[in-house]
Image (tube, coloured by chain):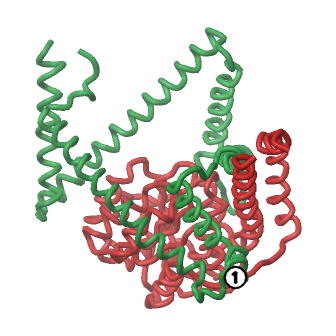
Amino acid sequence: MKEKLNKILKLDRRYLFVLLTLSIVIPIIKPIGIPSKSISTSVKDTYNFIENLPEGSTIILSLDYDPSTAPELHPMASAVLKHAFKKNIKVIILTFIAGSGGLIDELVRTIPPQYSKEYGKDYVVLPYMANPLAALTQMASDIHSFYDKDINNKPLKDYEMMKNIKNYKDVAGVIGITGTALLDYWVVYVGDKYGVPILGGVTAISQVGYGPYLQKKQLKGLIGGMKGAAEYEKLISQPWKGTSGIDALNIAHILVIVFIIFSNIVLLILKFL
Amino acid sequence: MNIIKKYIPLTIVFIFGIITLASYYVPHRASDEYLEWINKWENIVSAFALFLGMISLFYSHYKKIQRKVDGWGYSLFVYIGFFIIMGAAILSKGNISKEGKLTYLGWSFNNIFNPLSATMFSVLAFFIISTAYRSFKIKSFAAFLLFICGLILMLGNIPLGEIIWDKVFGWTKLTIGEIKDWIISVPSTAGRRGIMIGIAIGAAVTSLKIIFGIERGYMGKE
């Protein structure tokens, strides 16, 4: 008995890998469609923030993630952008992550046409900047002095929506969607110093770390992980990859929990044998 | 030599450190102009740092290939990957798409960088599942607490978790979301805040030590 249990504990990890693969692949091929019963307060706060902005306001959407964290963060970015366009809010998209270029390009190729939004009038995309701290502090005095050209290498001042935007005073808020510490930078260097409302979207693993900012309202709202993305998609009634991806996440999470409990029960039995 | 290698760098750091620190707290036009000017310098220096990093990366992998160390074949891919993406970027003039169509760079991003990057990150899931089964041993009260918090956060992060919780613990009238929010906003926030304050004090002290020339690690060896 003892030997058998020890054998179970030392199970070849390849069996675990196969089980995990199946638990992720099957729900993706054949979605179960388990609905999210509740909506997190911080996700609702983010939704309400955009929902209550007056038409024609401008927000900064800082999309600082690359393909490694895209499964969680890309659906959030898409949902927030769709919501902003639906409410006729102008969007300045920027990034401090070099690998995000293709993901931003995908968003601006697919979403604006769905809402008949025009480049330069309803949204602009700023080029990648390697030095986020310099950009964040500089935009407080003059956005145009730091970003004189957009991603197409055309003068930013020539675009209709940018004519009345000089610095943070002219934007209604910043939404930072990131898998890095850049949201902290937005809070510390922009939100706290210049009083700009900061909201965020982060991976589930880093969501816990933003408790202090949420508690003190330094962050007005936070979308956390794929569940947060699915909740936001539910709020705007536009299910996309957040909603479909949550199925795979459901089974994989349960598998991890089952494995921890199972191995510890085996360990406990071994202790008394 | 001491002047060039020691006193000039120390003076530069002292002067710019003090002015930059002061400009953050002095709300004056001169502060803004200074920050604007120093930001441009910072960008220029960052660009050079990136270039130096690239040279260093190429050199270290060149050495691996030259010495034929274990896994030297992988080092070849550093060059292959770099030149493929570089070539695609030059041909596409840095644009990912043009008139709604993907350029060579866009194609490389979608079909090379995107899947490779996602794969690297996905491998983590396999490590997690293996660790969860083989190494997460609840042998103490602290480990038990960690397990309970982890369990609640994991269940709170998935809709299936909400359903399971309601079925098993529905009688408590508490939702898994409420408990998860409490963990995030009370014990986790307390711990996180303590760590943040510690890091901030540490960073401030280290910065002051650098500005006043006590900490000189950035100058390299004598």
Chain letter belonging to callout 1: A
The answer to whether residue B119 is left or right of residue A169 is right
Query: Are there few (<14), some (14-19), or many (20+) residues within 10 Å of tag 1?
Result: some
Q: Could you tell me if residue B126 is visible in this image?
A: no
Disc 1 marks which amino acid? Gln
Place of residue A89 in the rendered image (x, y in percent of width and height, measured from the top left): 49, 83
Q: Where is residue B170 shown, x and y percent of the image?
A: 66, 86
- Closer to us: A195 or A124: A195
Judged left or right of residue B201, residue A208 is: right
Residue at coordinates 26% horizontally, 71% vertically from top-left? Answer: A194
- Across the whole image, how many numbered discs are drawn on residues? 1
Which residue is at a point 63% across and 58% down the rendered structure image? A70
Residue drawn at (81%, 45%) of the image: A5
Describe residue B150's horizontal placement relative to residue A159 as left or right. right
Which chain is rendered green in the image?
A: B
The percent coordinates of residue A208 (x first, y second) are 48, 65
Q: Split into 4 quadrants, where in the image is the C terminus of chain B? A: top left
Q: Nearer the viewer, residue A60 or B158?
A: B158
Q: Quadrant of residue A215?
A: bottom left
Q: Is residue A245 visible?
A: yes
Q: Which residue is farthest top?
A: B67
Q: Is residue B185 above or below residue B103?
A: below
Q: Position of residue B154 (x, y in %)?
A: 63, 66
Quarter of the image for residue B99 reads bottom right
Q: Which secondary structure, mark 1?
A: loop
The picture's colour for chain A is red
Q: To which residue does mark 1 refer?
A: A238
Q: Pick whichever, B115 or B141, lies toward us.
A: B141
Front residue of A196/A181: it is A181
Quarter of image, res B93 = top right
Taking B145 as reference, is A198 above or below it? Answer: below
